Image (spheres, helix red, strand yellow):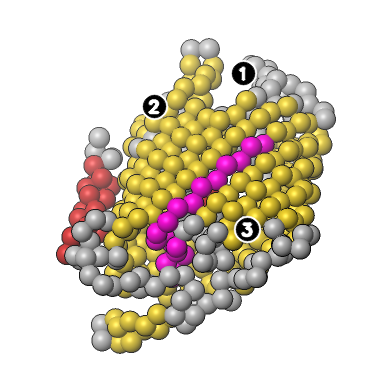
């Protein structure tokens, strides 16, 4: 108990700090500057300006990290980042969204083919190629004997229909159907049990139906301010070659040759009744369910950023979890955030989270599955900085995540997320 009390007290204090100015900020005529708009303000007697930005042409470099001081072995530090490219002309037509990090990449390129620029061909590419072995975790214990080097790369082609449904360039309705094909390949790690049966290197084909609708107004640091965003994904996968794999003593995994997965999300940003526009309430929910999923097709939940475009909003964030720590075939998360605008470039945030996911646990006959609960409290800030920099920082306490120490399972974990972005 003593290990959880100090972080909880700190977060409660942070909540008071965040809520105090909101209570004082009664309704007035102030209007929060929207993303891309020019803004001028006074900070401690000095004038501060933010120039107008062209949001149809965005390039930035991001570096971030998840820090878990009392996290499981191997998850204490999880780096993230990459170069982000967004090209979406105001008049519509072709569109490019790409995140390039070398080890992990995600690219989608739409080329308009109809006269009204609604119908487009779609080309996609995504890859994850890491030159080290990765381990899974059961109740916070690292399964070194089952670690693997596993990598994947896919290209996709398809068709999309998208149209502008709001004033901002990212306010769009987008529906796409793509066929994604590529390979999965594997190798053992330094600690892999000699008896471990490696998965089969295989070709995989996926059918991916994707829908997004975005009517969010974002503030200057691209956080949801007013409006809503929602999306759905349905994926069917088939592997041409697939044999049972894993540790014989744990029972070989026989699922995964063909699989289905469906997920969805919704975000709603609104004002707080009786308070000025500096105060914002953001509610969000994410859910996913799959059939015949395995380690290589399951949903993965972990810490990360809540900042970004409509596609970033579709990703599930589980506070104080390691990067991709929770592997599950079913999950539901609900978040409620109160945000206060101190200056037009500085926002304080307090967020409560509830999450449920099917996770493996130790049982009398080996590993079994149960539905775990992961309530969490997060406090943080997002701010713009000089030289086109911005920063996001958050501290979280998750009361449901587990860690195994000397065979004893302990509940509760603190975590930190920090991210710095430079726009060009």
Identity of the residue drawn at 67% across and 36% down: 235
Q: Real-space Cα distance between discs 3 and 2?
A: 54 Å
Numbered disc in front, either 3 or 2: 3
User: Is the Cβ of the residue at disc 3 closer than 8 Å to that at disc 2?
Assistant: no
The residue tagged 1 is 250
Q: Earlier in the sequence, mark 3 or mark 2?
A: 3
User: Is the Cβ of the residue at disc 3 closer than 8 Å to that at disc 1?
Assistant: no
Residue 161: in magenta span: no
Residue 234: in magenta span: yes
Q: Real-space Cα distance between discs 1 and 2?
A: 21 Å
Numbered disc in front, either 3 or 1: 3
Vertical placement of residue 32 versus 66, above or below: below
User: Magenta part of the protein: which range?
Assistant: 217-235
Q: Nearer the viewer, residue 328 or 196?
A: 328
Q: Nearer the viewer, residue 350 or 1?
A: 350
Q: Tag 2, which secondary structure?
A: strand
Quadrant for the C terminus, please: bottom right
Residue 87 falls in image quadrant: bottom right
The residue tagged 3 is 163
Instruction: Return the residue found at the far top.
Output: 365
Instruction: Return the residue found at the far front.
Output: 116
Q: Real-space Cα distance between discs 3 and 1?
A: 50 Å
Vertical placement of residue 395 versus 386, above or below: above
Identity of the residue drawn at 39% across and 26% down: 408
Q: Please rate how many residues cluster around mark 2, counting C-alpha atoms within 10 Å: few if below 14, some from 14 to 19, many from 20.
A: few
Identity of the residue drawn at 42% across and 56% down: 227
Does the rendering let one see residue 103?
Answer: no
The residue tagged 2 is 408
Q: Earlier in the sequence, mark 1 or mark 2?
A: 1
């Amino acid at each position: 108990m003593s290990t959880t009390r100090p972080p909880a007290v700190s977060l409660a204090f942070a909540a008071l700090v965040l809520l105090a100015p909101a209570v004082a900020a009664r309704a007035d005529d102030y209007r929060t500057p929207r993303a891309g708009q020019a803004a001028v303000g006074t900070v401690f007697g000095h004038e501060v300006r933010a120039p107008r930005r062209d949001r149809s042409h965005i390039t930035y470099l991001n570096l971030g990290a998840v820090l878990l001081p009392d996290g499981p072995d191997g998850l204490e530090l999880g780096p993230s980042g990459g170069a982000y490219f967004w090209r979406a002309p105001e008049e519509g037509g072709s569109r490019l969204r790409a995140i390039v990090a070398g080890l992990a990449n995600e690219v989608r390129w739409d080329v308009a083919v109809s006269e009204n620029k609604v119908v487009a061909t779609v080309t996609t590419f995504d890859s994850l190629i890491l030159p080290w072995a990765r381990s899974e975790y059961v109740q916070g214990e690292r399964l070194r004997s089952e670690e693997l080097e596993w990598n994947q790369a896919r290209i996709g082609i398809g068709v999309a229909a998208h149209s502008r449904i709001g004033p901002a360039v990212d306010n769009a309705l987008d529906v796409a159907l793509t066929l994604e094909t590529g390979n999965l390949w594997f190798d053992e790690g330094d600690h892999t049990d000699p008896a471990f049966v490696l998965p089969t290197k295989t070709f995989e084909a996926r059918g991916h139906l994707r829908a997004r609708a975005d009517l969010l107004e974002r503030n200057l640091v691209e956080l949801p301010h007013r409006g809503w965003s929602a999306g759905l994904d349905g994926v069917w996968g088939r592997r041409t070659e697939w044999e049972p794999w894993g540790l014989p003593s744990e029972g070989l995994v026989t699922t995964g040759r063909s699989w289905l997965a469906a997920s969805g999300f919704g975000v709603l940003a609104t004002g707080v009744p009786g308070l000025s526009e500096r105060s914002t309430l953001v509610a969000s929910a994410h859910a996913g369910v799959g059939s015949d999923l395995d380690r290589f097709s399951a949903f993965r939940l972990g810490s990360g950023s809540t900042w970004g475009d409509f596609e970033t909003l579709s990703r599930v964030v589980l506070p104080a979890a390691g990067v991709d720590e929770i592997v599950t075939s079913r999950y539901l998360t609900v978040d409620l955030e109160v945000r206060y605008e101190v200056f037009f470039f500085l926002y304080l945030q307090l967020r409560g989270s509830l999450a449920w996911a099917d996770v493996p646990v130790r049982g009398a006959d080996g590993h079994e599955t149960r539905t775990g609960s992961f309530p969490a409290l997060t406090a943080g800030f997002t701010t713009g900085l000089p030289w086109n920099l911005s920063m996001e920082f958050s501290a979280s306490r998750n009361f449901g995540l587990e860690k195994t120490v000397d065979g004893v399972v302990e509940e509760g974990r603190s975590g930190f997320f920090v991210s710095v972005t430079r726009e060009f």
